[in-house]
Image (tube, rainbow, N blue to C red):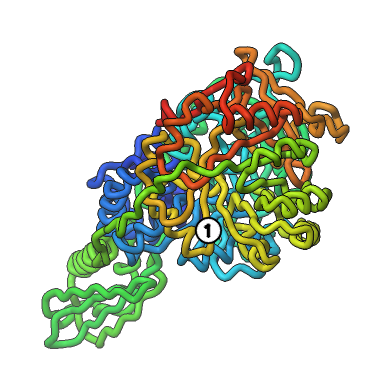
Amino acid sequence: MLELLAPAGSPEAVTAAVQSGADAVYLGYGDFNARRNAKNFSLEELGAAVSYCHVRGAKVYLTLNTLVTDRELPAAAQVAAEAAGAGVDAVLVQDLGVLRMLRQAAPGLAVHGSTQLTVHSLDGARRCADLGMSRVVLSRELSRDAIEHICTHSPIEIEVFVHGALCMCYSGQCYLSSVIGGRSGNRGLCAQPCRLKYGWGRRADGNPLSLKDMSLAGHLRELRKMGVKCLKIEGRMKRPEYVSVVTGIYARAIREDREPTAEELAQLEAAFSRQGFTEGYYLDRKGPDMFGVREEGPEPRELFAKARAFYQGGERQRVPVTFYAMVRPGEPVQVGARDPEGRVATAQGPLPEEARTRPLTAGDVEKQLSRTGGTPYLCRGVRALVEPGLSTPVAGLNALRRQVLEDLTRQRGAAPPAETGIFRPGVRYENRAEPPVPIFSCRRAEQLTGALMDLGPALVYLPLEEAAAHPEAVGELVRRGIGAGVVLPRICWDRERPELARQLSRAREAGASDALAGTLDLIDAARDAGFRLRADFGLGVYNSQALKVLRDLGFVSATASFELKLPQIRDLSKRIDTEIVVYGRLPLMIAENCIVKNRDGGCRRGCEVPGGALLTDRRGERFPVLRAPGCRSEIFNAKTLFLADKAADYRGIGAWGARLLFTTESPQECLQAARRYLEGGAWAPRDLTRGLYYRGVE
């Protein structure tokens, strides 16, 4: 059965969603969810919401899908235990450390992988299954063919977004808000800088990062046939009237096995849109037509007023029940009701009397018991045994009906016994005493000069496709006794896997031994090709528990999130070797839509020049846009992270490796930067930043 999942940013939105036909709602409680600016819920409100939903046959999913520090994990564990006690049906997670914590704090809770996990392939879904998740929310960028392939073979349930805002960047991989404004999307406080003005010259005169909202309203039957388990509506920051309008349209279409009508589509657009909707990703038709901005216009007062009147106007009968009744001489009148899950409520009234005029019939009993208006229940049938010649007051039957339904409501709304435990961080591993080894990450093989290798790095990374195209560069590293690693694509769809396998084979044959993975999707591919696994920043290592999970998955090292402060990295219990990025342009976004191609009107490879295309913001900052594997766009920071003059700060935090990230630099600039870090001197980039290592993020 296809499940419709609606957003609930407030208690009123819960009512709006459920009364409008949602099968489940997702909501936030506490400070560890990806919409911290939503109203969210108190513990009392959470319990009331769960009870309200369960009575009406709807499920409740808690969003616990942000990255959490070690100091915050005990509080997150408390949130999880309280949510389990309130009876939530599942919890959504991004942080692998939170996942590990949940096994202790709330082992009975079902876990769903958030779209913040950036799962976009079958192997990613399988990895989520191996980690104990029962469902995963796929990246919004996937086409219908990609979704169908995953659904056909996935061992767990698949959830997809069908309506609402689209992020320019793959969810879970965006650092634009945090790096330029200190508000992290991975911590639930994205400031949505992608909606601002940007340009390609010296002026920010366009909106090349602002996508229209998605709507797959015309593909509901197709999604069901694919095997998608759940359709998700985005919008926890939206008002309840919006939730009611959108949920109602999708719910009716799903229930009636049809697509929304032209009138309903117009209502969706009136409720909220950015110059219309897009289905470009789903149809695999990317391009400038997918972009739009929110235009100021009159509020759809009539539409919203009608929606508000609907969800505030009383109960919608949505829970089918079967009534049972028995009227026999010398025995109290008995009435019972059974719900779809097999719960039974019973009540008995006075003894029936001998009929003086018209005797009671089974039809009379059925008529009274089926009057369930004003309740969440819909009478699906009455089985009545009424012996002849008896009579009982109609008011008595009505009272018995009310009594059994109230009892059934109490049973349905009661939180089941929760399985909770105590979160224990476990053994603490001491920091390394020695300073981190130097690691170079070159974007282009030409940057890897003999002079750069002469500096003696412990490990050098090249992008996988670059290593495969330049086996001689890999071979030279091996000849010099330098570790050779490949950077796996952060995004690699299943249809791209054959080429990836060829590249892995060529790089391995050339002598590359290590693979740097930024998501869960390519672990098996790299390991099967004979590579040693290392975790990149895209896996969001924010706490010590995440390092333990990665160790269990076979990783030998992990890159600490560059959203952490240096003291927070120092305090990590480092179960495996830990890398930190100490130099370079930090990656801010990776996008399925090539914004350079959109600008040029076609693929003219403007993204492949060493310095990349330059995207200008309102303050005149210029952000390089470079090509990512698969002809995707990757946006890098305008300023260069520089810590060479802060060596004492990062060398004493117990990291195994300090990575210099070379992107737009010329070979000579790479050499200058590396020498500055390894040999000292006075060189510094023209426009530098300390990143987030000192100021942190919200």
Q: Which of 297 and 123 is in front in this view?
A: 123
Q: Which amino acid does label 1 sit on?
A: Val
Sort mark 1 into few (<14), some (14-19) or many (20+) by Cα contacts within 10 Å: some
Q: In the rendered view of the protein, which quadrant contains the C terminus?
A: top left
Residue 336 vs 90, above or below: the answer is below
Q: Is mark 1 on a helix, strand or loop?
A: strand
> Residue at the spot x=31%, y=44% of the render?
72
Residue 99 vs 296, above or below: the answer is below
Task: Say whether residue 316 is visible.
Answer: no
> Residue at the spot x=66%, y=41% of the render?
441
> Residue at the spot x=50%, y=37% of the render?
562
Residue 282 vs 660, above or below: the answer is below
Q: Nearer the viewer, residue 367 or 210?
A: 210
> Residue at the spot x=35%, y=63% of the render?
103
Image quadrant in which you'd find residue 667: top right
Position in image of residue 512 (x %, y %): 71, 56
Q: In the rendered view of the protein, which quadrant contains the N terminus?
A: bottom right
Position in image of residue 651 (x %, y %): 45, 37
Residue 99 vs 620, above or below: the answer is below
Q: Which of 217 and 642 is in front in this view?
A: 642
Side of 414 where 267 appears, left or right:
right
